[in-house]
Amino acid sequence: MFAKTVDVDRLARNLVAEGLQPTKGAALNLAARLLGASNHHALLAQAKAPKLATWSIPDIQEYLSSEAITTGSRFPKELPPQFDGAWQHRATALLAKAVAARTPGELEFIALVGGPGSGKTLLAKHFCKLSGGCVVDVGLYRWFTRPYQPAAGEIVVFDRPALPRSAPSASMARAFELWSHTAPRQRTVERAKELFRSEWQGIPMDAPGESIHGSIARNLAQAAPLIVCFASPEEAQHALDGSARVISMYSPAATAKLNWRAAHLVNLDNLSEHTLLRAPPEKT
């Protein structure tokens, strides 16, 4: 964990400047050994995929907390070559328009839609890089971090990693019990993220049985533009219509404030945008 926060390249330059090593490569290897790795390349590999087998529970919790919310340092400044300049300009402009269409304080979100390979996740992260913001891994966020308060002007992206849950756990205690029975060589970052990710079926809406006052989605959407990726417009509409309806005893206006209202949709399959409204409740 320590190596992730250390500028090893800068440390090597300092060692070279002080005449402790004749070459930068040798200095890099020395710096890596000082941090417990065999060489510079091994240290970089360990930082990207740390070995968790011998980590203590508090260290694992801290690591998962750091993974639950990622910020601009990990986001692409530019998109890959297959997304040419014209596409990037158009897609970014559509996303900016959808963000601007959001009514502040209302329960609205931006639905970024596209099939596999359409670039929606990359675009969302790139947009965060341009505008400032973060990506929230909701499953890890619910257990391992304090409530996040976006800064003014920040964008929030809800990430839904497609990781298997071969051993779903009902509680953090159960997750740690399963972790303790995991063979050391299998205690990988991927396994930890799989095992410790809490169940979530309400993205981006409220999870089943969740208090509206404790809803991550509601709190974030009311504080900042919330971008959520979907495979199709139908999936986005279903999420909007399928969220729990809350009824106020005082007035229809109060009821409207308590419920998800709209999704401002950007479709990367055909580079278009429009607003989805929540379907009215069925009359009984």
Image (spheres, rainbow, N blue to C red):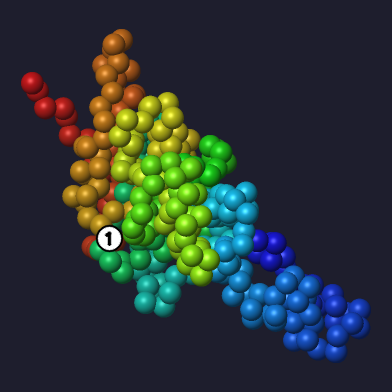
Q: Is residue 9 in sight in this rendering?
A: no
Around disc 1, counting alpha carbons within 10 Å, would you say few (fewer than 14), some (14 to 19), or many (20 or more)? many
Q: Residue at x 51, y 70 (%)?
A: 185
264 or 139: which is nearer to us? Answer: 139
Q: Is residue 19 above or below residue 137?
A: below
Locate the N terminus and report the quarter of the image it occupies: bottom right
76 or 208: which is nearer to us? Answer: 208
Q: Residue 110, position in %: x, y?
A: 35, 46
Q: How many marks?
A: 1
Name the side, left or right, on which 67 lies relative to 214: right
177 or 197: which is nearer to us? Answer: 177
Q: Is residue 219 in sight in this rendering?
A: yes
Q: Residue 93, position in %: x, y?
A: 39, 57
Q: Residue 38, position in %: x, y?
A: 70, 80
Name the side, left or right, on which 54 lies relative to 220: right
Q: Residue at x 61, y 62 (%)?
A: 54
Q: Amino acid at mark 1?
A: Gly
Q: Residue at x 53, y 37 (%)?
A: 147
Which residue in the protein does label 1 denote? Answer: 114
Q: Residue at x 28, y 37 (%)?
A: 262
Q: Residue 11, position in %: x, y?
A: 79, 72
Mark 1, secondary structure of its residue: loop
